[in-house]
Image (cartoon, grey):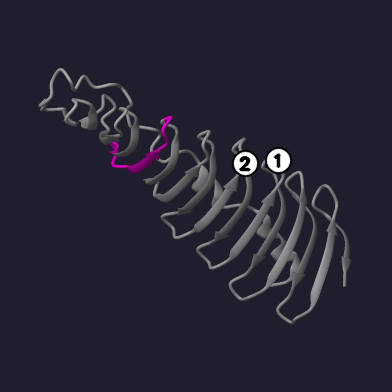
Amino acid sequence: MNMKERVAFVALTVVSAIIGGAISGHVFGTATVDAAAHPHAMMARKFVLVDSHGRTRGVFDVTENGVAQLGVYDGTGTLRAGLGVGESGAPALGIYGKDQKPRAEVGLAGGTSQVLLYDADGARHVAIGVTSQGVAGIALLDKQGHDRASLTLEQAGTPGLRLADNTGSSRIGIDVTPDGLPGIALLANGKTRAAMTLNADGAGAVTIYDETGGTKASLP
């Protein structure tokens, strides 16, 4: 594979699947349950667990949207963990802070298994996922939700590292093909402007591109 064929590695193929939305969609309800008035309540659509003071510590029910969910509350009545399965079969586990903002989620969405980690403000910063096709990836996001760095391993066995600017636009790409050929690309406005590669014969090459993607200069 020559340098010209290899420069296309800069296209992202998996990160959007990995970070494309929260796993659970925050399906775990936080509505107050009047457990004190019904300390031993058992209903067909809802089971309520209370402590010795009549405070709600757990709720197992089915929402109007068809989500079967189990919510676990602390001593103040704050939701801290939730397990849910949507009507379509998508499962999710959520861990919440004292302010009920999500801090971690694990689930399966659209065939992609995911782990999402949030900061204290509820903003996603880390996403780890594996698609149904076996493509794995890790993405790091800023507070605005832009993907700033990602590491992927595609089905063909190609690892790739992407670094982006504060708009989420890729600026640097690094990869190694399944047959061991490395390459680095510099991008602007989504187009490769410079690339450095190592071909199968051991020869290195540097290519400069214009704003349309056409070759402007190359060495050798």
Q: How many marks?
A: 2
Q: Is residue 85 magenta?
A: yes
Front residue of 46 and 130: 46
Instruction: Give the magenta range.
Output: 84-99
Q: Position of residue 156 (x, y in %)?
A: 53, 66
Amino acid under label 2?
Asp
Determine the residue located farthest toward the bottom in the rendered image. Answer: 201
Residue beneath the point at 53% across and 61% down: 154
Left or right, 145 with reference to 35:
right
Residue under the point 54% across and 54% down: 138
Mark 2 vs mark 1: which is more N-terminal? 2
Q: Are marks 2 and 1 in contact (CB under 8 Å)?
A: yes
Residue that badge 2 annotates: 142
The residue that disc 1 covers is 166
Q: Nearer the viewer, residue 83 or 114?
A: 83
Image quarter in which the N terminus is found: bottom right
From the image, which quarter does the C terminus lie in?
Answer: bottom right
Foreground of the two, 159 or 139: 139
Crowding at dot 2, Cα within 10 Å, few <14 / some 14-19 / many 20+, comes out as: some
Residue 177's disc number: none
Q: Look at label 1 and name its amino acid.
A: Asn
* Label 2: which secondary element: loop
